[in-house]
Amino acid sequence: MLDASEFNTHADLLFDRIVDTLDASDADFDIEINENVLTVTCEDDSKIIVNKHELNREIWVAAKSGGFHFKWNGASWVDTRSGDSLAATLQRVVAAQSGATLTFG
């Protein structure tokens, strides 16, 4: 398990990558970071929320399609239930809520 410092380093890099990917797209997103929560508001006012859950050393994603929990496996963030990557899940939920096809790799 990651210690708090390692978790925050990986999580901060993830947040930066998400924001950079959304900013580089042609889609209209409103992005807000408030402490450990990244809120992405899509053009239709639906939200995707990415939360750094430090206690469990997990990244939680809430979207219209459901809630997802991700743990660092040493190389990437992986869904604790399905085994899907966080990048693939973000790609899927962003496409479903905004119509934008983005790569979060």
Image (cartoon, rainbow, N blue to C red):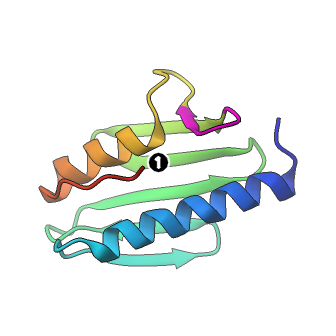
Point 74% across, 61% down: residue: 9
Query: From this viewpoint, is residue 103 visible?
Result: yes
How many labels were placed on the picture?
Answer: 1
Instruction: Indicate left or right for 40 with 37 as reference.
Output: left
Kindly state the secondary structure of the residue where label 1 is placed: strand
Which amino acid is tagged 1? Answer: Val
Quadrant of the snapshot with the N terminus: top right
In the rendered image, residue 2, in percent from the top left (x then y), is placed at: 82, 42
Residue at 46% across / 48% down in the picture? 61
Q: Decide whether residue 72 is among the magenta residues.
A: no
Point out the stretch of residues depicted in magenta: 73-78
x, y percentage for residue 46? 24, 62
- Residue 34 image position (x, y, % from top left): 57, 77
Question: Which residue appears at 61% of the width and 63% of the height?
Answer: 13
Crowdedness near tag 1: few (<14), some (14–19) or many (≥20) residues, C-alpha within 10 Å:
many
Determine the residue positioned at 43% across, 71% down: 19
Q: Identify the residue under disc 1.
A: 61
Residue 41 is situated, as x and y percent measured from the top left of the image, at: 30, 70
Q: Quadrant of residue 72?
A: top right
* Position of residue 97 in the picture relative to residue 3 (left or right): left
